[in-house]
């Protein structure tokens, strides 16, 4: 470990490596080999093995259902009143799979290639290949469960193409793909609840992970959760713990995430020894409904599939920006994506589409209401599509999205072009995991958006759902058995010092929130943090801005702990207390995100460093210096975080600079 | 806008509840109904009064978590979820009465929050297709006629919010049940368990204390996803085929 602080902010530790992917095998054989090498657990022993899975989104529900079917003794947790409401339900656009049903040249290798390239060469080759490989099974599984994907008249499944790719490999269920996939996984989960292999704990929030060292090194052996209805602090012990708790986009306050999406589970694990990978990698989604004012609690995304038929433009002249768009003639419109990127046009990758929209608005050519003095919106125009396909065909394809837009904005998009603006949508960073999806704490596995692994610096559309289900149905159940084959581990008693300590930590934190009795609401802190993050650690970042942000966050955090107001009691339902815990963790994570963003002096994917751009303003990567995963170790409350680097080696795909021109 | 709200406050499941009046000021027409409640809660916190508990998560009309009775109507005056109801549907100075879902199988947890766990138990009783992971045939092995696929999809849009139950004078969950039974019953994959499914789900529905359907149609009028009444006819037809009389 370096002795002195680098940039005054962090230390550097030993490099880290993923050691589980088989070596010396062709990438197409690695997963088969790993499955073969992983130890088996005899069916009679499975019943004796206790598995905790936190999260019931696509990643968690699919894993719980599958491990329940296999006969393990599963406990499943979520903070909503029902597992069916996990945030995955909100995904609209679709799910990718290398089925090549359209015969347009798709293959496992091409999906692998597109994903690595789309992630701007900052994801791990081995994981991504496996993701592409199992993708086809996902569709089979979901259809068998009754997921009503869109079909053609012949009764076969339909596909569409989706943001940034040139083949049609996206399966969809109108604009409700996430809902339909989740309902499928949820029903499979409830089937196991009925069968008694899974016990469901809804309205439970995990607040701590229990890590025990019984002489053979630390292991995750359970969690502390709060029953949100009774307020009771519960201890749940197990042989293995899986976190499938989703992403942390809500650190920005305004995002497309569900209100309760949080980083707590991952952050608590981080503080107990799990490394946090690439925290600054945030996905900004290009097609959200622009903010209308200060009352707003969240932003709404509209499926990116809209970019297949909608054309994006702004007025050529700033003075036209407050005109009715229908009165602006063709020659006065700037279809800027088609102009700058003729090969991809409106289908350029998300980060490019997002940043260019911001550029247009920063130039003063944005449209719609001004928020804080800037019009933050560009047009997404369906007039051509309506003329070409007819209004009915457009309605059939996008009707529900148009209705949603009208409900929120009060404008009819069949008549007036929609307005869109980028918003925070997804986080590619998350807990570091190896090929087996195991974190740096043995026995703590992490799946879905909560881990960092598959998407690199930028996530392609329709691939998060794919990852969630791939992890939960096919990957984790195979890798976790290798770990569980060493169990059942020694029975733990609830008075084990590590358990007692975890319980105490949770209790003390709650007592502290209840006793501060300050003057400011939890939400006001969250909003302020969100502003700092969006302005200084959002789409475009500078060294100066990030340094300011770190100071501001530290000051805000100190103020929070002395002046936050949490009313009511900790016994029973207390939603302010729940939010206080989440915001406290965001206040710590936010600082790490800024440190990570500061240290990565390159632009890649959704992370644009103003200091690192080409002459014509495109993102400039520095592969010689930064082709690694930044895995951060918690340094302690008073100490700086420690950076471990995992080098990214591209053996099967040539690392190239990106060009969409 | 300025509004006068009457809100059901109830400390915990066993405490008695009561209506409390609040005045809220500075509501934007563009805010959603829940954002209006957020604002009220900020104002209450400032005054040192405990905020009103209500459920929400996605705030985009898809998770089914939100839901209150507004002026006597489940999810309020428009056919949408509470989170997608916007304040432009109200007028400055309006008086609004806000209550939790009222139905015996949905006990109040606190204020506007109720327990809808019964829905999960109905699904656990049989609202699924049994397909173990890894055992599925190729997705194209069984084509599905488009009409069936579309009807299955329409029924699958149910978000499990419970407004149908709250709106029904008998506290029946028939629309929710019918939606699931129709969704799975329209698909070839759903056929093997079709009759056992309807029987098991119905048994669970009744034992949870939901009432019977008397075809009043309040459910479908309140349903934010526009699930039509004919899913209930399909459920009843399937029930008869299953040889299960009520
Ligand atoms: C509006 C929107 C549209 C999207 N569209 C697409 C799309 O078209 N295609 C695509 O591929 N991806 C899309 N995504 C991304 C995708 O939906 C998510 O990345 C993915 O669903 C995450 O799944 P998950 O299972 O990892 O986590 P989630 O679905 O977020 O589930 C998290 C679970 O963890 C639980 N949880 C969290 N913290 C705790 C805690 N402390 N204690 C207990 N439980 C906890 C929650 O209750 C929940 O059950 C979209 C995302 C959004 C927001
Ligand atoms: S049928 Fe409609 S009202 Fe009833 S739970 Fe489903 S979506 Fe809600
Ligand atoms: S909060 Fe999800 S439907 Fe209203």
Image (spheres, rainbow, N blue to C red):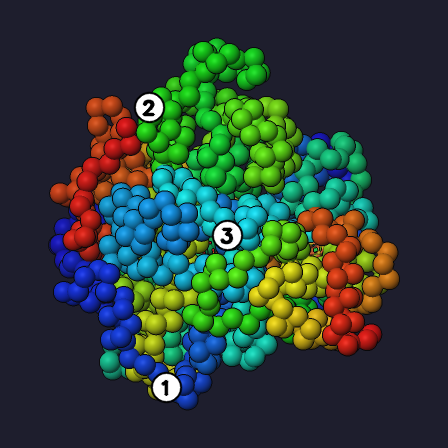
Residue at position x 46%, y 81% from top? A71
Q: Answer whether labels 3 and 2 touch (C-beta < 8 Å).
A: no
Q: Which element is circle 1 on?
A: loop
> Picture coordinates of residue A61 (x, y %)?
49, 65
Location of residue A406 with respect to B148 vertically, above or below: above
- Chain assignment, label 2: A
> Picture coordinates of residue B206 (x, y %)?
77, 73
**Label 3 or label 2, whichever comes before in sequence order:** 3
Residue at position x 74%, y 65% from top? B235
Mark 3 or 2, closer to the camera: 3
Does any atom of ligand 1 lie closer than 8 Å to the CB of label 3? no
Marks 1 & 2 on one chain: yes
Q: Which element is circle 3 on?
A: loop
Q: CA distance from mark 1 to mark 2?
A: 59 Å
- Chain assignment, label 1: A
Image side of residue B50 versus residue A528, left or right: right
- Count of numbered tags: 3
Q: Which element is circle 2 on?
A: helix
Residue at position x 42%, y 70% from top? B134
Q: Observer-nearest residue: A280 or A473?
A: A473
Is residue A392 visible from the viewing direction of this image? yes
Q: Residues within 10 Å of mark 2 (few under 14, many from 20)?
A: few
Is residue B102 visible from the viewing direction of this image? no
Residue that numbered label 1 is attached to: A42
Residue that numbered label 2 is attached to: A340
Location of residue A631 with respect to A491 vertically, above or below: above
- Chain assignment, label 3: A
Residue that numbered label 3 is attached to: A157
Q: Image quadrant of residue B13?
A: bottom right
């Amino acid at each position: 470990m370096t002795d002195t602080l680098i940039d005054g902010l962090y230390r550097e530790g030993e490099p880290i490596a993923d050691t589980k992917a088989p070596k010396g095998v062709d990438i197409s054989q690695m997963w088969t080999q790993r499955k073969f090498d992983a130890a088996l657990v005899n069916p009679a022993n499975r019943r004796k093995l206790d598995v905790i899975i936190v999260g019931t989104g696509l990643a968690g529900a699919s894993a719980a259902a599958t491990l329940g079917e296999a006969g393990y003794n599963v406990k499943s947790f979520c903070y909503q009143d029902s597992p069916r409401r996990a945030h995955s339900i909100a995904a609209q656009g679709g799910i990718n799979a290398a089925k090549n049903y359209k015969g347009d040249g798709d293959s496992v290798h091409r999906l692998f290639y597109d994903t690595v390239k789309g992630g701007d060469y900052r994801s791990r080759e081995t994981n991504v290949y496996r993701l592409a490989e199992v993708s086809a099974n996902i569709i089979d599984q979901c259809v068998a469960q009754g997921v009503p994907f869109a079909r053609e008249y012949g009764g076969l499944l339909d596909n569409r193409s989706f943001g940034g790719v040139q083949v049609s490999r996206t399966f969809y269920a109108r604009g409700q793909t996430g809902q339909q996939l989740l309902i499928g996984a949820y029903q499979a989960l409830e089937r196991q609840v009925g069968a008694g292999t899974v016990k469901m704990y809804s309205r439970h929030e995990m607040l701590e992970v229990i890590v025990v060292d019984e002489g053979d090194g630390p292991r995750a052996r359970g969690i502390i959760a709060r029953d949100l209805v009774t307020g009771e602090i519960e201890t749940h012990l197990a042989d293995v713990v899986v976190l499938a708790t989703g992403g942390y986009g809500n650190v920005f306050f305004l995002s497309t995430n569900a209100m309760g999406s949080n980083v707590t589970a991952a952050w608590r694990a981080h503080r107990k020894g799990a490394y946090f990978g690439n925290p600054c990698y945030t996905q900004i989604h290009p097609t959200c409904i622009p903010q209308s004012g200060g009352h707003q609690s969240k932003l709404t995304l509209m499926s990116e599939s809209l970019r297949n038929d909608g054309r994006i433009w702004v007025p050529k002249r700033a003075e036209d920006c407050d005109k009715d768009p229908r009165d602006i003639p063709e020659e006065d419109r700037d279809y800027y994506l088609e102009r700058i990127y003729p090969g991809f046009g409106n289908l350029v990758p998300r980060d490019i589409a997002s940043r260019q929209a911001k550029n247009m608005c920063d130039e003063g050519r944005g449209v719609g209401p001004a928020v804080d003095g800037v019009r933050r919106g560009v047009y997404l125009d369906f007039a051509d599509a309506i003329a070409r396909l007819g209004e009915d065909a457009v309605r059939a394809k996008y009707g529900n999205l148009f209705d949603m837009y009208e409900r929120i904005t009060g404008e009819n998009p069949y008549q007036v072009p929609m307005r869109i603006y980028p918003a925070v949508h997804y986080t590619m960073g998350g807990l570091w995991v190896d090929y087996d999806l195991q974190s740096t704490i043995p026995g703590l596995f992490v799946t879905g958006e909560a881990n960092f692994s598959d998407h690199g610096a930028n996530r392609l559309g329709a691939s998060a759902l794919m990852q969630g289900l791939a992890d939960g149905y096919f990957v984790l159940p195979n890798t976790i058995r290798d770990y569980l084959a060493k169990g059942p581990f020694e029975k733990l008693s609830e008075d084990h010092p590590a358990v007692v300590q975890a319980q105490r930590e949770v209790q003390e934190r709650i007592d502290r929130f209840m006793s501060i009795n300050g003057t400011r609401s939890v939400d006001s802190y969250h909003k302020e943090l969100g502003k700092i993050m969006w302005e200084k650690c959002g789409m475009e970042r500078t060294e100066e801005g990030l340094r300011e942000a770190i100071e501001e966050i530290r000051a805000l955090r100190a103020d929070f702990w002395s002046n936050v107001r949490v009313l009511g009691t900790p016994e029973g339902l207390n939603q302010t207390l729940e939010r206080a815990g989440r915001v406290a963790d965001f206040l710590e994570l936010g600082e790490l995100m800024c440190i990570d963003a500061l240290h990565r002096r390159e632009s890649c994917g959704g992370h644009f460093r103003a200091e690192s751009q080409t002459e014509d303003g495109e993102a400039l990567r520095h592969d010689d210096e930064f082709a690694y995963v930044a895995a951060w170790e918690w340094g302690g409350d008073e100490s700086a975080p420690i950076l471990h680097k995992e080098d990214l080696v591209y053996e099967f795909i040539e690392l190239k600079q990106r060009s969409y021109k | 806008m300025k509004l006068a709200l009457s809100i059901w406050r109830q400390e915990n499941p066993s405490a008695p509840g009561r209506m409390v009046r609040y005045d809220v000021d500075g509501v934007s027409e563009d805010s959603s109904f829940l954002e209006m409640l957020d604002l009220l809660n900020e104002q209450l916190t400032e005054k040192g009064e405990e905020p009103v508990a209500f459920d929400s998560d996605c705030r985009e009309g898809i998770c089914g978590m939100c839901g209150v009775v507004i002026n006597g109507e489940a999810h309020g005056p428009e056919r949408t979820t509470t989170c997608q109801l916007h304040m432009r549907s109200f007028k400055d100075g309006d008086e609004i009465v806000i209550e939790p879902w009222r139905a015996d199988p949905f006990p109040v947890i606190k204020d506007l929050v109720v327990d809808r766990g019964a829905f999960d138990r109905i699904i656990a009783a049989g609202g699924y297709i049994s397909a173990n992971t890894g055992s599925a045939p190729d997705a194209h092995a069984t084509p599905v006629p488009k009409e069936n696929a579309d009807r299955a999809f329409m029924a699958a849009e149910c978000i499990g919010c419970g407004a149908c139950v709250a709106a029904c004078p008998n506290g029946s969950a028939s629309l929710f049940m019918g939606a699931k039974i129709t969704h799975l019953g329209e698909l070839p994959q759903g056929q093997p368990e079709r009759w056992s499914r309807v029987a098991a789900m119905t048994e669970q529905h009744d034992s949870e204390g939901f009432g019977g359907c008397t075809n009043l149609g309040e459910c479908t009028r309140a349903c934010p996803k526009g699930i039509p009444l004919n899913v209930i006819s399909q459920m009843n037809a399937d029930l008869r085929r299953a040889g299960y009389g009520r």
